[in-house]
Image (tube, grey):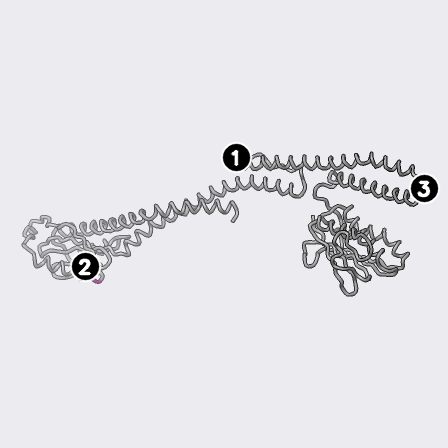
């Protein structure tokens, strides 16, 4: 998981944990509150109807119309009125609640003591306190009101569904608030992580450029203190690498130049010798030594021109070297063919190194195969089985060579074996390798070269 993802997960997870810890007692509190409010609502409606009944004798039809109007109110708790004669007005109570209400009404009629004697004077009849009973998964609130005909039982039933509905509305608000807090935490975490990752990405980009050989790359000195410390350390490291490379190049070049003075003295001594085969051999060795020193100086100075991570167009180099070797192969009766890849083929090596490797392989073909032996150079964009590498094959119809010929100083053809070693070093320096194959009568030296 990325750093941004971890910061986001941490912020949302911590917020969710806090919300859950607060939500558990809050839900319990809301449930109790909803239960109490539902009970109080039922008790208020039951008392109001009981007060209406206690005002005096009323026509049954008029009382029924009043109860029906009360029950028709929005979000009202259903009310049932049980008259002294057993008539039931209003909503029908479900199951156990209805049975209990009828039983209570019957008990009230049996316990009647003549409290309704004052009805002739239109005095208010007595009303009992509300009684709450847990019945059938809900709450039954009953109130007795006295009338001239006997006690009337007014019952209001708050079912469990009513409590759940009231609780559900409040839980929806709670969930909406929780979701809002999670979104707010996620947005804050995203803003913080973007700022942090932006600075880290800039530092990583500078590190990538350094890895690709751009020693001028530097990380920006911005962001949190920890990120600035990393950027500062990376910048110091880049400066140190630049200094070390410069010192190394200068040291190699300086040593090479210092060797020219004793080399010149040796040449003067050799030239002062009487002409002989021995003196000519010494002069040849001196020429070789001088060319080697020149190559060392050239190699030491090359990074200043090509950079730490050089690149070359393999197609251009192949075309150039094939044109160079074609006159010699034609004189020897050979066919030198090439199959270049279409368009430029960038590889991660210097042109001089690739040129030297290709020259070494072509020289091996010319020097160690009979005249008239065909030679072919094949350049392919994608190596097999490594599609990320460029494949360069130099092959001939010669007698072949042992697989360990690639080792330095090893050859079955009487040479030093340095040609294959030069090609191998070029391939490995680019991130590839050298392979030897024998395919359909062809001796194949395959260079797998890395891309820039």
Q: Nearer the viewer, residue 357 or 449?
A: 357
First in sequence: mark 2 or mark 1? 2
**Residue 88 visible in the displayed image:** yes
The disc placed on residue 89 is 2
**Residue 65 visible in the displayed image:** no
Dot 3, crowdedness within 10 Å: few (<14), some or many (≥20)? few
- Considering only vertical position in the picture, is 153 above or below 226? below
- The residue range painted magenta reads 95-100
Image coordinates of residue 23 in percent, x first then y, are 34, 47
Q: In this figure, which residue is indicated by the disc labeled 1?
A: 225
Q: Nearer the viewer, residue 314 or 428?
A: 428
Please identify, in this view, whether the residue under mark 2 or under mark 1 is nearer the observer.
1
First in sequence: mark 3 or mark 1? 1
Q: Considering the numbered disc 3 on the image, is that residue within a helix, a strand or a loop? A: loop
Q: CA distance from mark 3 to mark 2?
A: 145 Å
Q: Nearer the viewer, residue 409 or 306?
A: 409
Q: Principal SS element in the magenta part?
A: helix
Q: In this figure, which residue is indicated by the disc labeled 3?
A: 275
Q: Considering the numbered disc 1 on the image, is that residue within a helix, a strand or a loop? A: helix
Image coordinates of residue 417 in percent, x first then y, are 79, 53
């Amino acid at each position: 998981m990325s750093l941004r993802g971890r910061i986001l997960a941490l912020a949302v997870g911590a917020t969710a944990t806090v919300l859950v810890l607060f939500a558990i007692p809050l839900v319990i509190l809301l449930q109790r509150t909803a239960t109490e409010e539902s009970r109080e609502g039922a008790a208020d409606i039951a008392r109001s109807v009981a007060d209406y009944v206690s005002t005096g004798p009323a026509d049954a039809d008029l009382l029924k119309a009043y109860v029906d109007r009360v029950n028709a109110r929005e979000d009202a708790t259903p009310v049932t009125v049980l008259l002294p004669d057993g008539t039931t007005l209003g909503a029908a109570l479900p199951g156990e609640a209805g049975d209990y209400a009828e039983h209570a009404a019957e008990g009230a009629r049996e316990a009647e003591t003549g409290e309704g004697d004052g009805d002739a004077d239109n005095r208010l009849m007595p009303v009992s306190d509300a009684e709450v009973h847990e019945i059938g998964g809900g709450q039954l609130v009953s109130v007795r009101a006295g009338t001239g005909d006997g006690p009337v039982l007014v019952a209001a039933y708050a079912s469990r569904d009513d409590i759940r509905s009231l609780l559900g509305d409040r839980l929806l608000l709670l969930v909406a608030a929780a979701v809002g807090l999670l979104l707010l935490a996620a947005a804050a975490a995203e803003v913080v992580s973007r700022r942090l990752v932006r600075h880290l990405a800039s530092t990583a980009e500078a590190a990538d450029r350094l890895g690709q050989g751009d020693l001028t790359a530097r990380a920006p000195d911005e962001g949190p203190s920890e990120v600035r410390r990393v950027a500062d350390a990376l910048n110091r490291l880049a400066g140190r690498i630049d200094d070390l490379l410069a010192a190394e190049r200068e040291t190699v070049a300086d040593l090479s130049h210092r060797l020219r003075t004793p080399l010149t003295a040796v040449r003067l001594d050799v030239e002062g010798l009487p002409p002989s085969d021995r003196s000519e051999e010494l002069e040849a060795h001196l020429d070789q030594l001088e060319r080697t020193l020149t190559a060392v100086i050239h190699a030491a100075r090359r990074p200043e021109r090509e950079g730490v991570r050089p690149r070359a167009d393999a197609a251009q180099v192949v075309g150039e070297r094939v044109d160079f070797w074609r006159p010699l192969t034609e004189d020897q009766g050979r066919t030198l063919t090439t199959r270049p890849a279409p368009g430029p083929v960038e590889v991660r090596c210097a042109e001089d190194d690739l040129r030297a490797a290709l020259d070494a392989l072509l020289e091996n073909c010319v020097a160690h195969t009979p005249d008239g032996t065909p030679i072919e150079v094949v350049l392919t964009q994608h190596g097999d089985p490594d599609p990320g590498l460029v494949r360069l094959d130099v092959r001939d119809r010669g007698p072949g060579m042992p697989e360990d010929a690639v080792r330095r100083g090893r050859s079955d053809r009487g040479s030093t074996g340095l040609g294959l070693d030069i090609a191998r070093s070029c391939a490995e320096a680019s991130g590839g390798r050298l392979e030897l194959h024998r395919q359909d009568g062809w001796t194949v030296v395959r260079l797998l070269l890395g891309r820039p």
